[in-house]
Image (cartoon, rainbow, N blue to C red):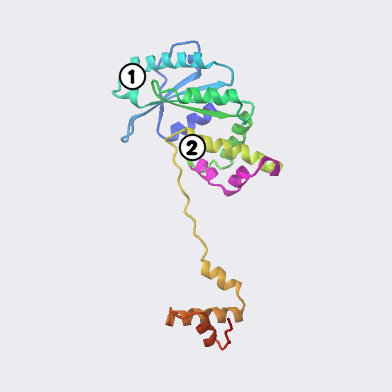
Amino acid sequence: MHNLINSIFKEAEFDNNERINFKGDFSANFSFFTRTHNNKFDFYLVANFKEGEIKLDSLKKQLDQCFESILEEMNETGIDKNLSFLLLLETESIDNSIERIRYIYNLEEDPYDFKKYVLTYTKSQVDALKTYIEENAQLPLITTLNNLLQEKTLFASFKKKEEDRSTTEKQEVLLYDLISKLFIKIPFLSVIIKQECLDSLKQEIDESLNQTQAEIVNLILEQHSNDPELHIDGILNKMGVEYNE
């Protein structure tokens, strides 16, 4: 997952700033990304842990130490107001336990220092996404992610009830769950809406009518065009049909 996130940040024009000397016992788990060009001013502290590997109090202490290191070594005005933290949390299942929900809530809702985001994932989800990315290597990574997010088949599987999903659809759910989280938890990822040409409704209707039905419809439309106030009895009279209430 760490490599995937690195690739996303790189394509979004972030630099992996390796000169920051983080303090603390878990400093090796942290990376720092900066984007200070093209009128952009963003900073992300990213950490990768397995669920249960670090307690919330210990993580917050480590964050304070990382924050101090960044402010000491980065000569950028306003960095404290433009810094975000992204926690990549590897789990065994996509189903959230009460403990996990509490952990995520207490971290993300902590108002101190900077914005915090927790992105949970499983190894099987990352493997599935890597396979898809490799099969679509001719496209930019973020474009591939956008295409997956707007894939109707995946979304349909995701919306189905668990008991109604086939084996294939269950795998699709794992993939779509991760994709949707990426766009929710990484604010600079924007959804690029794909433009689709819609079929003409009139053409579909015309193609579904037989000759007699088409003639009737054309006659009705012609009469209504000549006289918009013409009611059903008048239309039927024009067609030579007796109208009875």
* Circle 2 residue: 183
Q: Amino acid at mark 1?
A: Met
Choose between 59 and 46: the one closer to the eye: 59
Q: Residues within 10 Å of mark 1 (few under 14, many from 20)?
A: few
Q: Quadrant of the C terminus?
A: bottom right
Question: Secondary structure under badge 2?
Answer: helix
Where residue 46 is drawn, which disc sits there? none
Mark 1 to mark 2 CA distance (whole Å):
28 Å
The mark tally for this picture is 2
208 lies above or below 9: below
Residue at the image point whose x is 46% and y is 43% from the top:
191
Choose between 24 and 109: the one closer to the eye: 109
Residue at the image point whose x is 44% and y is 11% from the top:
23
The residue at the far left in this view is 77
In the image, residue 57 lies at what x, y percent? Answer: 50, 14
Q: Which residues are magenta?
A: 143-164
